Amino acid sequence: MMFSSLGSFLAVSVPGVIMTYTGKDNAITYTLTGVIFSVIYCVAVFITWYTTWEAKDIQDADEVQKPPAPARHFLSHVKHMFVDLASSFKIRAFRQHLLIYICSFTAMDVFLAVFTYFVIYGLKQDASLASLLLSNMMFMSIPGTFLFMLLLGRFSMTPSNALRLSYISIAVVLLYLYGVYLWQWHVPVLLFSAAFLFMGIARAGLYYIPWNIYSFIPDIDEMVTRQRREGIFAGGMVLTRKSSVAIAIFIIGVVLQESGFAKGNGAQPDSAITAIVLLMVGVTGALLAVSFWLTFQFKLTQRSHKLLIKEVARRKLGDSPKDCDAETREVIKALTGYAYDDVWGASKKEPLQDAAVKSELKG
């Protein structure tokens, strides 16, 4: 995610730097920009390929629970794909995580979509100020990601607490911006920049934590289905994300149009300015509030995940479900949404495992 933040920063800064030397209307500007980002993309893909590998299950390959293969014709594959996607929503932690993810990211989509208009028409400032503030925010997302990595890793802060810290910090900046607009304060550029440097750090947590949480969701699903379905959950997240951002941008356009907003005009009617402020402060704040509330329902922590994977390893040994302690049963129900007796294939016979699995469990 640090490199993702760096990519976002480069995307808004590199074209501007190139334009200062080649000119805005020079065709070589777009060629150079394309070449530079193509090289960066290829380097990133190579590093990913070179430094990653497939995770190895502690089960033998012939003992892993495999889903039934779908029929070979096209319609059956399509049906199977949607059935798999739908089945992912049966996992409680994934449903909660997905709502947090969509609400958080959509909140920032709305904010970024109308912020420049807010600066120009609401604060009556130049567009260059909006560009400067957004660049500051993008830049601070890089060290901000590292900060949240430390909070989750070294300081063992739970994902829910880290998300709440991010939401509260962003809400403070939103209230500050609303106050500047409401009372038309004359704020020095340095103070504006400081606020957006702070927001960049907070924004990093909003983007980093949901994707950090995602890697643990398949472990929860495995407790229910006895399958590793990382691709299904990644597909569900990407599909809902792409759909939500498209819908959000469409709604923003409709709201601005209905409010009388006319792009390119030097002045906008009061109704349009009000709509811009409501979208940036009201809608963004409301979506963050929903995510904030959901974090209290989300029970995945470092401890609960440890109990979960220990129980998965125990069940892979073929141990009796009756030996599961009460705390682990409660954790599994809170994460999966299923009672303990309804997970791990319920009625399916469990395979016996070898000494390597027992060693993994004890470790």
Image: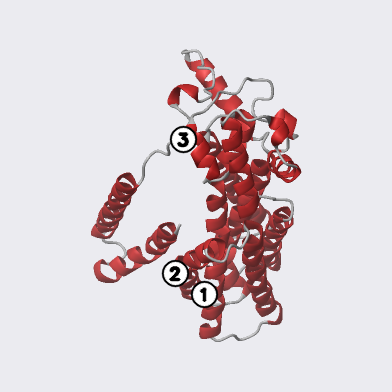
Count the numbered circles shown: 3
Residue 356: image tag: 3
Q: Are circles 2 and 3 on residues that touch, CB within 8 Å?
A: no
Q: How far apart are marks 1 and 3 (CA)?
A: 49 Å
**CA–CA distance between discs 2 and 1?**
8 Å
Q: Mark 1 points at which residue?
A: 197
Please identify, in this view, whether the residue under mark 2 or under mark 3 is nearer the observer: 3
Dot 1: what SS? helix
Q: How crowded is mark 1: few (under 14 residues within 10 Å), some or many (20 or more)?
A: many
Mark 2, residue position: 139
Q: Earlier in the sequence, mark 2 or mark 1?
A: 2
Q: How is the image coloured?
A: secondary structure
Say which of 356 and 171 sits in front. Answer: 356
Q: How far apart are marks 2 and 3 (CA)?
A: 46 Å
Q: Position of residue 12 (x, y in %)?
A: 41, 63
Q: How crowded is mark 2: few (under 14 residues within 10 Å), some or many (20 or more)?
A: many
User: What's under tag 2, amino acid-wise?
Assistant: Phe
